Image (cartoon, grey):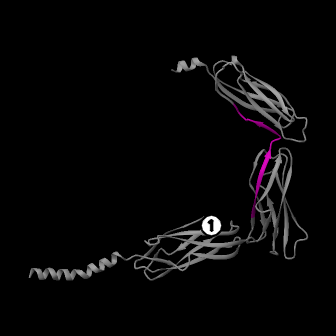
Amino acid sequence: MRNSLAGFAVLFLLPGLAVAAADSHASPHIAFQQTRQDAGAVPQGQSIRSVFPFENKGTAVLKILDVKTSCGCTIPRFETSIEPGRAGTLELAIDTKNLRGAVSKSAIVISNDPARPQIVLTVDVRITEPVTVEPPGFFRFNVLEGTAESAEAVLASSDPAFQIRSAEPPESYYDAVVNEMPGAPPGMKRYKVTVSISSDAPNGVIGGTVNVKTSLKTQPEIKIALTGVVSPQVAVTPSFVNFQNFQFLGHPVQRRISVVNRDPKDPDFRVVKAEVKGARIAADVKAVDKGGFDIVLTVDPKIGRGEFEGTVVISTTNARWKEIRIPVQGLVFDKQDFVKDK
């Protein structure tokens, strides 16, 4: 009787065990109809919405855990839970405002599908700009300090409503002038934007953008970069002199400063004198070539042990570079210092 009851219990539990075994093998399976789409040619500024249909061909609920896009211009929209046998969609909305030319934007779909936990979706698009800029991308300058220079760009469009309303440079030492160009091809309108940099622009790398405002809703603003450099009329290297740590061993302790005239309109440029203030260092001026001078700094052996600091003052005939000041420092030691340290 006991054996019969045991057998009955086993038979009663078998269906439950079968269901449990079946459930343990249930899994979702994500299947996209396509993972790459071509959005074709799209005007710059127009939003793109690419829809990727998919289906859960598995036997368990499909969970879309996350969608990671390649840039902030792409926004995903998707259903997070899809029952077995049901279909869903994933949409990628792409902002083309700052895109140019042929581009591809992608997104990584992360799900609980054990076979394909990550799937990459891609949208290809060719951005057509309502307004073209030639040369593309920037105004370039290579200016010598104290001189003015101009650069030009031509903006064109086939839209009959196209007009340039203004061109705004980033700093007061720039000027921007807009003129409509005659003789444009039929169906085209062209404008020339001339950007000038004045003679009082500071030395260094040129940066920033010119903001061009247009009448087009599809491209109301165009940013054109400024690039290049304003070079000083007089080049001085180094800008800081460090003798570091040294001891007098019977030969002069020296450093050199190079001063070079870059202004071709000043052929009579000279370094008048050089001296060091605040430290016992001699400064001798030597002409090395036309427009070039070396300032030879020699430390006085009587300067004494320890740290020293001073300023090299260089006087020239250039009105902008009449006085050049270069910091100088160093440390004098001898063998006794090492003995004390030990």
Q: Is residue 170 visible?
A: no
* Number of residue marks: 1
| Residue denoted by label 1 | 73
Place of residue 289 in the rendered image (x, y in percent of width and height, measured from the top left): 85, 34
Q: Is residue 262 visible?
A: yes
**Quadrant of residue 175 within the rendered picture:** bottom right
Quarter of the image with the N terminus is bottom left
Query: Where 315 falls versus 33 (above or below)?
Result: above
Q: Which residues are magenta?
A: 222-241
Identify the residue at horizontal 79%, vertical 57% (top origin). 139
Place of residue 122 in the rendered image (x, y in percent of width and height, measured from the top left): 59, 72
Query: Where 74 falls versus 281 (above or below)?
Result: below
Principal secondary structure, stretch drawn in magenta: strand
Identify the residue at horizontal 63%, vertical 19% (top origin). 305
Instruction: Confirm whether the magenta stretch covers residue 179.
Output: no
Name the element at disc 1: loop
Tell me if mark 1 has few (under 14), some (14-19) or many (20+) residues whose alpha carbon lies within 10 angstroms of its own: some
Place of residue 73 in the rendered image (x, y in percent of width and height, measured from the top left): 62, 66
Query: Where 170 falls versus 53 (above or below)?
Result: above
**Quadrant of residue 208 within the rendered picture:** bottom right
Which of the two residues, 48 or 274, is positioned nearer the viewer here?
274
Q: Is residue 240 left or right of residue 273?
A: left
Q: Is residue 66 left or right of residue 139?
A: left
Residue type at tag 1: Cys
